[in-house]
Each structure stands twice: as C-alpha cells, then as structure tokens.
Image: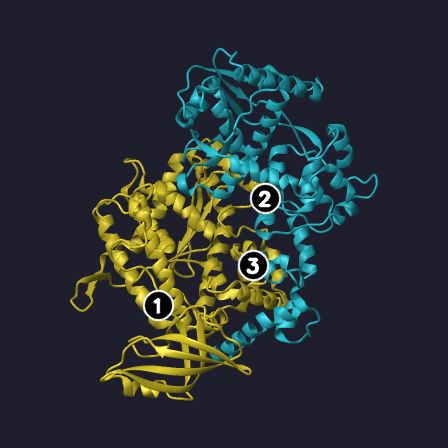
Chain colours: A cyan, B yellow
Amino acid sequence: MGEGTPLGEVELAALRGGLAPSTNTARDLAATAQTPCPRRRALAVVGARTEDAAARLPGPAAPSGQSPFAITVGTRFEEILRRDGAARLREALERAVPVELGELELIDLDARHPWRPGVPRPETAAARRSATDALVAACLRGEAEADRLVLHPRLALTVTDTARDVEPDALLCLRAGRGAQPELLLVEIKAFVDHGHRTDTHDLASTRLQLAVYALAVRQQLARLELEPQPMREAVVVLRAPGSMVGSASLEEVHRDVSRLERALARAPATLSEVLATLPEGAALDDSATLSALPVRYRPHYCLASCAMALQCRAGVEEAASPEYYGSPTREVFAAIGDLRRAHGLVTGSEASETEEERELVARLGVLRRRIDDARRRCS
Amino acid sequence: MFLSADAQALLAAEAFVEDAAVRATGCRHLRVDTAPFILVPLGLAGEDGAPLAFGWGRGEEMGLCVVPEPRDRDEVWAGLTEMARVLCRWIDPIGEARIAVGEKRKRWVTRESAQLVVPTGAGADLLRKLAARMVWAPEEVDPVVRRAGGWLLFFLDRHELALWDSALLIVTEALAMHWTLPLSGAEGSHLLASLAALERPGRAREAAQEVEHEPGGALTMPDFDAKKLEPAIAAYGGAASSEGRAARRRDVEDLLRPIVRRLYEACVSGLERLRAIPPIPAVLEERHEDEREALARHASYLREEGRFSKADSLRRSVFLLDGVEGEMKRVRSSARRQDPVLRAVAMCEGAALEGEVLRSDWVRQRPRIFRAELVVRVSGAWRASVERFQVVWEREKPAHVAVIGVEADGEHTLVHLRSADQHKQLREELDGLLAPGRPIALVQEERSFQTFGFPPEVPWMLRGSDA
C-alpha cells in the first residue's frame, strides 16, 4: 500500500474527469482480486464506472446493465428483509449465527442519518462513519446494553493510496460471541437463490470477496479506534430461499478471501501513484487516448461475463492474433510466441523458427501437428 | 474434452488462422437418436430458477408453453404442469416397455432408448433447479409434475455421472467436443454463436459476433427485458378481465416464441451436423444398453413413487465418484482405440503408440506357454508415460503388452514390448496379427477400481460399518 496522505474524493474526481463515479466501491475492489487487468484496476483505484469508460473507448461496447427483473428482485428482497424492524433478517440470522441471539437492538443508519438532497454528501457520510465507530467501540468495550444489528454501517477504507467509504448491508455487534467475547459479524444480503451445494459458486465467491473488502475496512477501523483486533474469519451471507422472499443465511469463511484480496491489491498498479506513473502528466481517465493506452489483460471467461469493456479488449487481442483471445490453455501454450498466426505458421512449417523458444515450440508441437494431420487423412 | 492442452492450443491456432471451425476428433463419440426430445427452457433474469417459457418437439414442429408471470407461484406450477404432461407423454411409454436381455435373460432394459436434448449448459442448470423444485412439489400440484421432475433428474444425473451414454445431450457441449471453434470457451457456450461459427467458414468470428447479442443460453437479454418483456408482463398482471389477460398472455407468447424457436432450430441444426460425423458403433452400442437398463430401473422407481433426496450422503457420493472415474477411464480408452485423431494426440503424451512391427518372437515360459516379444518402429520421437498398453485390434479378447525398452533410431524410435498375457492356443492367430511389417496400435491400459464393493482406496473412516 502507498505511503503518505491518501487521496480523497476531490483528487479522485479530478482523475476520473468526466467518468461517473462507481456506486459500489467494495464490488470494484473485489473485482480487482478476480482479474489482473491493469485497465480495470486503474478504474477501480480511481473509483470510476467501467460502463462509462467503455462508452469512451473506440469500438462497440458490451451491452451494459442488469435486467430490470434482477434489479427489482434485489431491491425488493432487501426491502422485505428490512421491513417490520428487520424481522425476516433477524429470523434468518438466528438460524445462522453460531451463538444464541438475545434481544437485538436494531440501528438503521439510513433512518438515523439519511442521505438528504439539501445536505452535502460528505457531511452525511461523516455522520454515518462516526455513528458506526461509536457503535462498534461500545460493543467491543463492553459498554453496549444489548446485541446490535446495524443496518448500512459506514466504514472508512484506505487502500491503493486512496481513502474511500464502504457500506456493508449490516453489521452484527455481539456482546458475547464465540468464546463469550465481543464479536463483530459482517452481513451481506444477496438476492440470488440458495440452492444448497448447487448454489452458483461464482456468485458466492464474488460475495465472499466483497465481504473481504468490508473485513479489511473493519480491521482498519479497529486499529484506528485502538481496539482489540478481531479475527473476522467468517461473515454471514443471506440468500433467498428457493421460490420465496425468505432469507436463507449461512456463515461463510472469508479469511482466505481477505488474504487473496490483500495479495491482489499489492499487485501492480498497487497504488494510485503507480497508476499515475502510467498516465501522461495531468491526464484524466475520461480521455479516450489515455484509456486506450492502459494495458489490458483479457480473460474471456471472466471479462465477457463481468466487464463492460470486454468487447473492446477482445477486438484488440483478436486484431493482434494474441493467444489471450482464447484464454487458457492456449494462452499458456503459446505464451512464448504471443501470436496465433506465427505459432500456426511455425508448427505447420510454413514459417521458420528464429529464436530458441520458437525452436523448442516446434520441437514439441510440430510432431503433434504432423501426427494429427496423418490421422485426419486416414479418417477422411 | 479428450484433447491435451497442447492439442487444444494447436487446433485453436488453426481455427483462428482459418477463421473456421476445425474438427477435433476423427469420429463422433456421442449417440444422436433419430428423433430425440428437444426441450428448450428459458428463465427469468434475476429470478434464479423461475421458468419463463419452454419449447419442445421431436422434429421441425415445436410446441410452446409460456409462463406469463414467472414470479407468481400458481402461474409457475401451471406452466410446469403443462411441460410435465408433454414430457411424461413422451418418456413414460419408453420407460414401461421393457425386455429381458443377457445370457440368462436377467437384465431388464427398455425396448428403445431415450434422449433428451437441451441447447446449453445454462439450460441444463435451469432444468436441474426446476426438477429439484418439481420432485418436492406440494401435494395440491398435479402428481405428473413430481413424476416429470423425477425424469428430468434422471437425465441430468446421467449427464453428470455417466456423461457418455448421451441420455442428455447438451448441444453446445457436443459441438465443442467435436469441433474447435475460433471462439473462446465463454463464447462457445452461446448456442447461436457456436452454430454461426460452424456455418460460416472464412468469417466464423464475425458471424458469431453478429448473433452474440441475441439470447443464446437460458435467459433473455437485459435490453429486451427492459423495453419489451417487463411492460408485457406488467400489462398481463394489470389486465382486469379474463379476456384481457388472455390477450396480454398472447402478447408475452408472441415476444418469446421467436426466441425459443430460434434456439430450438439451432438444436435441430446442431444435431444434423453431429449426425453427419461417423460414430464409433461398438462403444456406443455398449453404453446404449447401460442407459436402457438405468432407464428401466428409474421407471420402476418412479412407478413405485420413489422419493428423491435433497443431497447425496458422503457414502453415496464416494460410490458415485468412483463410478464416474471408472466410466471416464473406460470411455477415454475406448475413444483412443476407435479414433485415430485422439490416438495421435495420446501418442504425443506417451499414452498411445502407432507403428510397424519390426520383429516378433515367441519366448517359451513353460511347456505350451509363450510370451510374445516385439520390436515396434515408431516414426519420430516417442516416450512411454505408462508401462502397460492394450493392443488395438478386432479380436474380442484384449491383449496386453508392457514396454520393456525404448531406443532412438535416427528419425524413428524402436519400442521393445513384451506380452503381459500368457498365450496357449492363440499363438498361430497372433502370429498373423503381429507379423513383421504389419501396422500396430497400442493404447494406454486404463485401470479403475473394482466394479463391485467399496473402492479399496477409500480411507476406512469413510466406508461406514457395512463397507
């Protein structure tokens, strides 16, 4: 991580230029652990929306956005869980949390410190952060009178030289958690259906990584408040029970995801200064030339499913005939050549090898090519 | 599926340069029935496992059932009941018509086989979610729904556990098994893109990209949902009279029919392309009978109203895994024996060998018991990855050989082999087959757990008291 004073929202806005700010910092940071793409990382570091960036890149962008049905179900599910003093959320948590929950005091920060049109956002954000700090400190110092369920707590997170806020769906502050010690449990609500062992593993992995971002923020918060560190090994994921709007909660291990996220954040460009080093002086990421100049790492399975810039990146690797066009295992097999046309020419003998790596490749794959061609002739 | 990473990369480079699909096998490794039951499921985005429409048929004609409000339970059960009736009308008679086969007529199999065809893996996933819901349907729902759920689970489980009998054929998977497309695996899971790439050699990538924004899996596209489907569903929900609801239902049907129809036609076209590849008959026949036996067993289970568990026990899982591993080895070995292209790929891994018999001698072990010792000349370099191989020949009884030495000989390799079987009476017959100058092919001998009882390699703590 970087040193010195982290950059705040104003400096990041300057770097984003005309790009719209991302609405989900935790999801963006979690995505950086799933893809090594420097362009995507740069956008995540400055907190910009990839859809907006894709619109400024040359070539057709991937159709962006979710289906309205998906958006509706997500909003409706969370609303139902929070309704009537979060009765359904409490029910779900009672089944998942490993200790007996007593009377839960519900603290809804959306009600206490709502986002009001007339009030500057930083002011409300600061109020929500302070309230969260006070609630967490009271719980861990044993000053709270009841277990608390905090809805939309706000946590400050400093990573990649930047200071940003993240908001998990809920935070459970237990006075007597496991080992009769105060315990914090992060809660994330997702509207996808809990199919037991057949639940989509990619969705669950993304959720765990998002929780890992929150876990990092909690760690930093505890250090800042000079409180006893919490292991944050597990967190609660609330999914939808099949065919209903009832929550199905379970404890998910996140400690490995926290380590994975930390490792990913340490990869270049790890800090904002490293991102800036790749850009011309005074450049902003809303400039098409600047964006295009950032290197990409195209991974078809991941990028096509989750990145708005995927089609433009694909067009780039296709034009260059890069083995990255196919992803694994072609990418690894032809890593030393980097050009599918050249690789094909070498193994079919229409082009001569020039380097030691090319000679090795021909020695290994040329025989296979000849044998496949022989077998094909016998089949036809 | 059968190819090494090197072979996949080689064919991928060829497909990219040609901008066309290239054949990845020499033969067809799947059964394709003359009139399989094609089922095209479509789900609602965001509502995991909520059916929106089903298309079905066995030829050019397609039946369609639409669930105009997939978030309404009653509508969902009504739609599933309609689909269940059609499915059971096809599969129930097949499951019930049984014959006894085998030497002692103790093996009951169905008279004919059944094959369910689904367009994509995403479609199969959606069907599994629906099937799990159907077998646990509430009592008030028509029993045909539970029965059809049980049938769907049969096909889906066979695909997971005995993939090779083709009881369930997923078109995108089958195409990817037999062709390398100039597309990544992610793009290949889109049925329309895969077919477009197959149909347009020379501009396959462009053709695939032209159709990739159309629904090619199990969901409609966000843009279509926002502009057309959501208003149509809302209009259906808001209709005051039964006539109005019927009219709005037809509107939803009119929106979804072309999408389902396109996927259905793509399935028909994909099956045609697969049928054009010559199959490997002997192996397919064998798998075919296993599937018919399982089908007959499953029909009995459903007739007796057998229930389905929500998850497998650890013990059952170990048995199932053992079965899958054994089956995979058997099928890989068969595929290499039958398909020269796959054998060529395996040869480069040291798991197969093709060459010419240079010398063959008979070494006497005991009176009337001999072992054959061979020297086989292989073109190019070769190195064995295992010790024991099976000879590829027409004789029913397999012959096993062990590699006892490999030596380079200019541009060739000389492989010294010794028969692992003791031959008594077959010497004369083998003399002809292994005579110098004859071509010979060997494939790696696949070993698996014993076929009955608990696998010996499983740790004792997983075996349970009765293992």
Q: Is residue B322 above or below residue B17?
A: above
Q: Residue B116: image x %, image y %?
A: 37, 57
Disc 3 element: loop
Q: Are marks 3 and 2 on the same chain?
A: yes
Q: How many marks?
A: 3
Instruction: Give the label, 3 or 1, closer to the camera.
Output: 3
Disc 2 element: helix
Question: Is A112 positioned to the left or the right of B62 in the image?
Answer: right
Q: Disc 2 is attached to a residue of which chain? A: A
Q: Are marks 3 and 1 on the same chain?
A: no
Q: Residue A166: image x %, image y %?
A: 62, 28
- Residue A77, visible in the rendered structure: yes
* Contact check, label 2 and label 1, Cβ < 8 Å: no
Q: Nearer the viewer, residue A128 or B363?
A: B363
Q: Which residue is label 3 attached to?
A: A329
Which mark, residue A113?
Answer: none
Q: Disc 3 is attached to a residue of which chain? A: A
Structural distance between the alpha carbons of marks 2 and 1:
41 Å
Q: Which residue is label 2 attached to?
A: A34
Q: Is residue B88 above or below residue A119?
A: below
Q: Amino acid at mark 1?
A: Leu
Residue count near mark 2 (Cα–Cα under 10 Å), binned few <14, some 14–19, many ≥20: some
Residue count near mark 1 (Cα–Cα under 10 Å), binned few <14, some 14–19, many ≥20: some
Mark 3 or mark 2, earlier in chain = 2
Q: Amino acid at mark 2?
A: Gln
Structural distance between the alpha carbons of marks 3 and 1:
30 Å
Quadrant for residue A315, please give it: bottom right
Q: Residue A40: image x %, image y %?
A: 67, 43
Q: Which residue is label 1 attached to?
A: B284
Q: Residue drawn 41% across and 16% down?
A: A102
